[in-house]
Amino acid sequence: MRREELREMSAKELESRLLDNLEELENLQFQKALQQLENPLRIRHLRREVAQVKTALRGIELGLRSTSESEDN
């Protein structure tokens, strides 16, 4: 996901996206442990996306984004 797309999302959408990504990451790590993982690079991409979503959420929390974007609370 591009950073521009993350900036356009509301806080609720970002939180939902974060939970989905964390759940998928957990499933992929489980598959890796069972040696059934087809695309190991997907774990790296998910970890990076989780970090980007957390950064966007932190920006909202600190008030770095305009209030019109975070009014959906």
Image (cartoon, grey):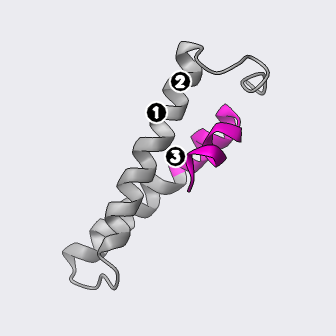
Residue under the image location 56 percent in, 45 percent down:
3
The answer for how far apart the CA atoms under marks 2 and 1 are is 6 Å
Q: Pointer 1: what residue?
A: 55
Separation of marks 2 and 3 at Cα, in angstroms: 15 Å
Residue on which disc 3 sits:
18
Q: Which residue is mark 2?
A: 59
Mark 2 closeness class: few <14, some 14–19, many ≥20 residues within 10 Å: some
In the image, which is nearer the foreground, mark 2 or mark 3? 2
Dot 2: element: helix
The quarter of the rendered structure image containing the N terminus is: bottom right
* Residue 41 coordinates in the image, percent (x, y): 32, 72
Element under label 1? helix
Q: Work out whether residue 9 can be spotted.
A: no
Counting every numbered tag in the picture gives 3
Look at the numbered discs 2 and 1 and tell me whether their residues touch, using CB distance below 8 Å: yes
- Which SS type dominates the magenta stretch? helix
Image mark for residue 35: none
Q: What is the magenta range?
A: 1-19
- Front position in the image: 24 or 57: 57
Left or right: 41 in relation to 60:
left
**In which quarter of the view is residue 23 placed?**
bottom left
Which amino acid does the dot numbered 3 rest on?
A: Leu
Percent position of residue 60, x then y: 59, 22
